Amino acid sequence: MNCPYCGRQESRVIDSRSVDDGVRRRRKCLACNARFTTYERVQPHDIFVIKKDGRREEFSRDKLLLGIRKACEKRPLPTGAIDKLVDTIEAELYRVGKSEVSSSYIGDLVMEGLKRLDHIAYIRFASVYREFADIGDLKQEVDSLAVRREVTPANQLPLPSSEAVSSLTGRKRR
Ligand SMILES: [Zn+2]
């Protein structure tokens, strides 16, 4: 268990309690004294992800977390929002109870979550995940977000122009 602040391994458990689906441990890093929380839970069963090309790989929470973190890079999200989204998606996968899920199903869950969380992160993730054929498709997606703007949380920044989107995703306008 690496400290999320300094990356060292040694930590001391300062509090441990049972929660609904496992054990919650409060830890203190012995190197930098930062405090953080870990959860230990039972994984009901293994889930395999079927990728677009038909390959099959074990579901990895870390990988999911990494993909979402990348999309949310430098976005002003509340602390814990990303972990919460990953928790929600993971819980949904176990709730569905299938031993195999398609990567596109997981992708859709991520998109759904990011749409509520942060539009920029959503567009970033969508541009990678949906592999928009051209900026026109992406523009359409941005426009459809704009239509739903009335539900935008008050603290969310306005949507970018399509020029900003193309620079954001590194795609050239045609
Ligand atoms: Zn530390």
Image (cartoon, rainbow, N blue to C red):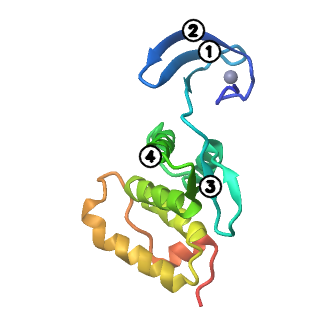
Tag 4 secondary structure? helix
Dividing the picture into quarters, in which one does residue 153 lie? bottom left
Q: Which residue is mark 1?
A: 28
Left or right, residue 70 beside residue 84: right
Q: Which residue is mark 4?
A: 92
Left or right, residue 153 beside residue 102: left
Q: Which residue is mark 3?
A: 49
Q: Is residue 78 visible?
A: yes
Real-space CA distance between mark 1 and mark 3, rounded to the nearest whole angstrom: 35 Å
Please state which of the two labelled residues, at mark 2 or mark 4, is closer to the viewer: 4
Ligand 1 position by quadrant: top right
Q: In the depicted view, which residue is nearer to us: 114 or 95?
A: 95
Dividing the picture into quarters, in which one does residue 142 lie? bottom left
Real-space CA distance between mark 2 and mark 4, rounded to the nearest whole angstrom: 31 Å
The amino acid at mark 2 is Ile
Q: In the depicted view, which residue is nearer to us: 73 or 61?
A: 61
| x 69%, y 53%: residue | 57
Q: Is residue 168 visible?
A: no
The amino acid at mark 3 is Val
Please state which of the two labelled residues, at mark 3 or mark 2, is closer to the viewer: 3
Tag 1 secondary structure? strand
Above or below, 148 against 117 in this view is below
Q: Which disc is residue 14 wearing?
A: 2
